[in-house]
Image (cartoon, rainbow, N blue to C red):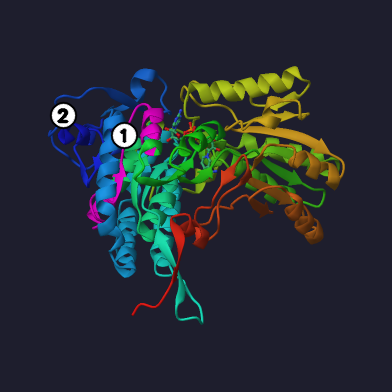
Amino acid sequence: DSSLLHDSSFIDGRCVEPIDSLPLEHHAIQMPSRGDQGREGRTGTFLVMDPSTRTDEEAVLVELVDGGEMAAHYAVDVAARMFEQWRAVSVRNRASLLRKWSELIRNHAGDLARIICAETGKTVYDAYAEVQYAKSYVEWFAEEALRIQGDYSCDPEARVERVAVGVVGLMTPWNFPAAMVTRKVAAALAAGCTAVLKPSERTTCTALALADLAVRAGIAPGAFNVVVAKDPALVSRVLSTRKEVAKLSFTGSTAVGKMIIRQSALHVQRLSLELGGNAPLLIFSSADISETVSALVSNKVIRNCGQTCVSANRILVHDLLYDRFLAKLVQRIGELEPHNFWDNPGEDPCSPNPDASRFFGPLIHQEAVEKIELHIADALHHGAQLVCGGKRIPKIGLNFYEPTVVVGGQPCMKAFGEETFGPLFFIIRFANELDAIRLANDTVSGLAGYVFSQDSGQCSRVAQALDVGMVGINTTAISDCRMPFGGIKQSGYGREGSKYGLDEYLYLKYVRGSLS
Ligand code: NAD
């Protein structure tokens, strides 16, 4: 019964979703109105929560219909049916539709930022920056679509074509609910693939709003479908057991990524995996302390409260500047301010606020708060010392946590081996470059790494020695739609963004013989 399935998800260009009833007025969000069709016969629902509130009661944003496996099957059917039609659209037209989508994202940037703010707790300014970042991928892949080229040899009877892989199953996390979606969907659509997206159940509304804008832009209904489901495992099982799904692209934790690898074996699906990180950030004796602290604080606190895969998880500091660095870091942390929507409802995401570089939001949920507490307690138990922070901030919101500095970090501690995903500055001292590199590479992850030094020879030596997919030299702002985003080791494989990101959705076909 397709009317029932439509009820929960955005499939075939339609969304009979109760998002018109989103109790988001406090965020002044203009959500698409969808009417009542198909609401009867719901089998189950789940709640989307605002992580930034002071009480659980205030936190409920919306009750969504759980599409479950049925919606996933239906979405795959629709995407498979649509594939021939979408890949036959000329690249010029695909590019122009993507450009139109990016224009609509730009025109609705304020609304999208408020939805992201509501679902993730990010400040509206941080959320607005994410919308710009998300839009950049749509613009980029609109241009890259025009550059999909095969190879022709001097032998007129042989050529190489680049061909859309088919229907793709996309799974995205909550921490960048718009950018992680556009980074995959825009590349897939540019390549001529049709997509079934399963966004994080925590940030479904952002994905639905993006899908709605895509259809308004003229992208064929059914080319980009969103399955809304409470249990992600049921959907990932459908995506990996349907032979029509040629490829899976997953961004999320390494643990779930490993499960996706196993599931993909059934039909030998192609995979792209953007998994967890454990970034080292190395600060050498010649580093500019002020610039280093500023880059670090924006990476660990201002940007999504440190909940990013490229967040510096282990901060390695040279003995010679250790005391001065620590003093500056603590001073800068003292200037930061927890900030929630509820106390600042009139804020306009589209109007820059010079104070925004001091604001930070909450963690995503209580388990995230418990994880940072566990990492701090474990470090202290093994001999580390707490310099500042270390407490919840319930007067601002249940999931707010103080930016915290812990020194005396050692490899035996949990915070060294695992992604903390929060505003913990876990600091380790080192005496020489070789020791620092050895410590930096002592992890199963290999996503991002950072070097801060004024010695150019040292910067290039260390950048070369780090076992990671991305290196920032005297910067933590490494995300860029033009550049390949991705990791090595257990941080996954495949790249997103850049010209390489498009290759993930194309296969090479060698053709021999004359056409006549
Ligand atoms: P997560 O693994 O819990 O969830 C990611 C996606 O997988 C979501 O869509 C979720 O619904 C789904 N999922 C969760 N459990 C599942 C299961 N048992 N079976 C199938 N699907 C399941 O990750 P998260 O908490 O949403 O995101 C944080 C993680 O994502 C961090 O580890 C972070 O480093 C990583 N991340 C990586 C990148 C990157 O580009 N490498 C970018 C952002 C986030």
Looking at numbered disc 1 in the image, what kind of residue is underneath it?
A: Val
Dot 2 or dot 1: first in sequence order is 2
Element type where label 2 sits in the image = loop
Q: Is residue 253 left or right of residue 28?
A: right
Of residues 442 and 216, the one nearer the viewer is 442
Name the foreground residue: 509 vs 79.
509
Instruction: Work out how far the residue at label 2 is from the one at label 1, CA to CA, in angstroms.
Output: 14 Å
As displayed, is residue 356 above or below residue 187?
Answer: above
Percent of width and height locating residue 354:
50, 49
**Is residue 205 rendered magenta in the image?**
no
Q: Position of residue 64 (x, y in %)?
A: 27, 29
| Residue 215 located within the stretch drawn in magenta | yes
| Residue 351 visible in the displayed image | no
Looking at the image, is 306 positioned above or below residue 375? below
Q: Horizontal and vertical percent for residue 47?
A: 32, 25
Q: Is residue 275 left or right of residue 430?
A: left
List the residue tagged with mark 2: 39
Secondary structure of the residue carrying tag 1 is loop
Q: Is residue 147 above or below residue 342?
A: below
What amino acid type is highlighted by mark number 2?
Arg
Q: Nearer the viewer, residue 293 or 6?
A: 6
Which one is nearer the viewer's eye here, 40 or 339? 40
**Quadrant of the image occupied by residue 314:** top right
